[in-house]
Image (cartoon, grey):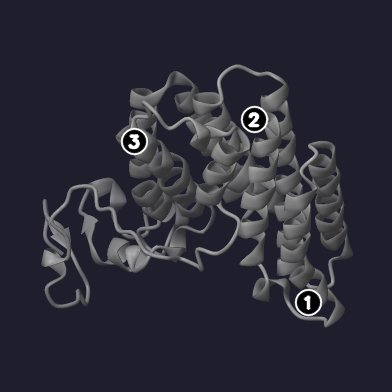
Amino acid sequence: MQRGRTWSANAPPHWNASSSAVVDGRIWLERSPWRLAGGWSVLAALLSIGFFNQLEGVDLPRLLLFFLLVDLLWGSIWGSMTVPNSVPSLEATHQQQRVWLPYLRPGSPAARLFGIDTPGILPVIGRVALPGILLALLISLTLHSVLFWLTLVVVVIGVAGWLHRQVALMPVVLLHSLISITLPWLATQQIYGGSLNTAANEALLLAALWTLHLWGANRNLNESTDRLGLAGVALAQISISIQIVLAQTPLWLALVVVLWLPTWLAVYRNQPLRRVEAWWPLAMLLSAFAIGQSLSI
C-alpha cells in the first residue's frame, strides 16, 4: 500500500493504458437488437404521427442527438442501475484501484459501506450510473426542458429497478416496459408530435398497448409457465387489431397478424418466446405505420 496514491492487486498488464478518457464510454450489443427496445419505440412513434411525410426542414443532427438520448443514454441508466455488474470488468477495476484515506482503512465502517473490503454494489453504480445520468441531463437540457423532466423520471425508475434487489415485490418487469416503450414514445410524441389532439391520443393508445405487450412477453420470457404474461400479450394484440380496424387500414392489419403468428406457433409447440421476439419490433413498426397512415388521410 502506498500513502497518498493508489494501490492495486494483480493488475493486468498495461492496465494504466486501458483508457485515455476521464469519463469512459464504451458501446456494445448487450443482446440482439431485434427486440422491443427504446430505439424501435422512437421509430414507431415517429411513424404513428406521420413524421416521415413531412421531412422538410427537419434538423437531422438534433434528431440523432434525441435518438441517442432516448435509446442509448436512457437505456444505459436503466441497465447500470438494475444490472450494474453487466458492465465488463468494472467491478474488477474497482477492486484493483482504490484511493488510500485514513477513514477507508480495511475493516472500517466506511470501508464496509462503500465496498472496499468486499465487492460492493454502491461503488459500481456510482461509477457507472452517475456519469451517464449527468450526461443525459446535460443533453436533455440542450434539447428541450420536457426531456430534462422525462430524464429525471428515467432516473427514478432506474432507482426503483435497483431496489428490486432488496424489495422482491418491486415490479421490475413493468418498469422495464415503461423504459423501453412508454417513455421513449411519449418523449417522441412531445418533441415531434405537437400538441395533444385526436392523432396524438391514437398514437399514445398504441404505445400503451405495446407496453402491455412487452410486459406480458417479458413475464413469459422470465417464466415460460406464466399464463398471465401470455394473457397480456393476447389482450394487447387483440386491442391493437381493433385499433387498426377502427383506423380503417385493414391491409396493414393483415400484415401485422402474419408477424404475430410465430408467437402463437411457439406457444403451441411449447417453445420459448425468445426465439420469436425478433418479429415484435416489425409488428410494432407496421402497426404504428398503419395508425400514422390513417391519421394522414
Mark sitting on residue 266: 1
Pick the residue in front: 97 or 35: 35
Q: Residue 81: x, y in percent?
A: 50, 50
* Three-letter code, disc 2: Ser
Q: Nearer the viewer, mark 2 or mark 1?
A: 2
Q: Is residue 276 above or below residue 7?
A: below
Q: Which residue is mark 2?
A: 296
* Three-letter code, disc 3: Leu
First reached walking from the N terminus: tag 3 or tag 1:
3
Quadrant the N terminus occupies: bottom left
Residue drawn 56% across the image and 26% down it: 193
Which class describes the residues within 10 Å of circle 3: few (<14), some (14-19), or many (20+)?
Answer: few
Q: Is residue 168 above or below residue 196?
A: below
Residue drawn 43% across the image and 32% down it: 55
Which class describes the residues within 10 Å of circle 2: few (<14), some (14-19), or many (20+)?
Answer: few
Mark 2 in CB contact with mark 3 (< 8 angstroms)? no
Residue drawn 73% across the image and 51% down it: 252
Q: Which residue is mark 3?
A: 60
Q: Is residue 142 left or right of residue 231?
A: left
Q: Is residue 4 left or right of residue 47?
A: left
